[in-house]
Image (cartoon, rainbow, N blue to C red):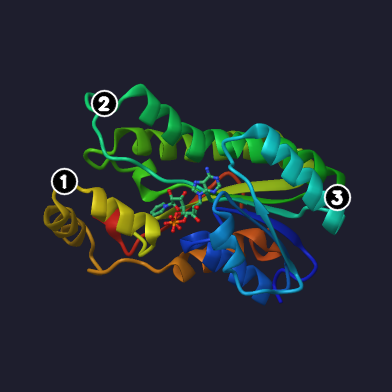
Amino acid sequence: MRLRDKVAIVTGAAAGIGRATVAAFLREGARVAAVDRDGAALEGLPPDQSLATYTVDVRDEKAVGAMVHAVAERFGRIDVLVNNAGYGTFGTVVTTDEAAWDDVMAVNVKSVLFCSKHAIPVMAKGGGGAIVNTASNIAVVGIRDRAAYVAAKGAVAALTRAMALDHAAEHIRVNSVAPGPIASRYYDEMLRKSPDPEAFLAGLRARSPMGRLGTPEEIASLIVYLASDESAFATGAMFTVDGGMTAW
Ligand SMILES: NC(=O)c1ccc[n+]([C@@H]2O[C@H](COP(=O)([O-])OP(=O)(O)OC[C@H]3O[C@@H](n4cnc5c(N)ncnc54)[C@H](O)[C@@H]3O)[C@@H](O)[C@H]2O)c1
């Protein structure tokens, strides 16, 4: 029960890393607001008396503000915010059009701005809390043909540091997690959209010392640590879990 009595918002909660985080948080005693734009998938989450679901597109500030207000009303406080919703697209700077760039920046970066802007005053009023942003190991190493996504995750890592400094005095810790390739719907989608799936997989295996994808649960357990008081002295840092990919 490492999160007993804590109230947590998790975005991108209906699938993959977010869904595994919701399950881990509930196991650890948290009350959880699961946020996703996919309402049907949210309905598929196992029912739990400590779980509330909110169908919200995190690119929409008005909807995010209303969700944060509703969570604070329902649970009385907010202790943890996990800014996890996100995805990428293929493309170099030459082949990425403005709409695709703006969308990748909105879902990965602007969403952190919107959710944090509305949640931080509530967290501060309750005495503090912890924010965990899902970056990626591509925040520190480049990969080919994903220019907008690499830029967006680099921005998430940098924004994490800025937020940590700005809100330390309010006892709000802000860290990011940097997963390597994780077996999830996002990953399946990238594989499906890849112009050359075989080459995509071969490139991945060649860069992976452990020779496998990670699981959403292997990231969720790190997020539990960063959300809990066990990580009380950690802020402004990026924590990598990538099977050794960035070690070479
Ligand atoms: N899977 C990987 O290999 C990997 C690696 C590094 C980082 N990440 C990051 O981890 C996070 C979670 O990815 P995942 O692999 O679990 O993906 P996923 O596709 O399995 O789950 C993402 C969830 O986010 C939701 N979502 C997408 N856009 C949204 C929006 N605008 N508003 C609200 N919800 C939205 C989706 O509906 C989905 O339920 C993302 O930020 C992703 O960039 C993933």
* Among the two numbered marks 2 and 3 on one chain, the one whose residue lies closer to the N terminus: 2
Quadrant of residue 149 within the rendered picture: top left
Mark 1 vs mark 3: in front? 1
The residue identified by callout 1 is 195
Q: Respond yes or no on whether mark 2 lies under 8 Å from ligand 1.
A: no
Q: CA distance from mark 1 to mark 3?
A: 49 Å
Instruction: Please identify, in this view, whether the residue under mark 2 or under mark 3 is nearer the observer.
Output: 2
In the rendered view, would you say 86 is above or below 211?
above
Q: Position of residue 240 (x, y in %)?
A: 42, 56
Q: What residue type is disc 1 on? A: Pro
Q: Residue furthest front?
A: 40
Closer to viewer: mark 2 or mark 1: 1
Quadrant placement of the C terminus:
bottom left
| Label 2 environment density (alpha carbons within 10 Å; few <14, some 14–19, many ≥20) | few
Q: Which residue is mark 3?
A: 126
Disc 2 target residue: 93
Q: In the image, is residue 12 above or below residue 161?
A: below
- The quadrant holding residue 30 is bottom right
Task: Determine whether, in the image, residue 218 is placed left or right of residue 204.
Answer: right
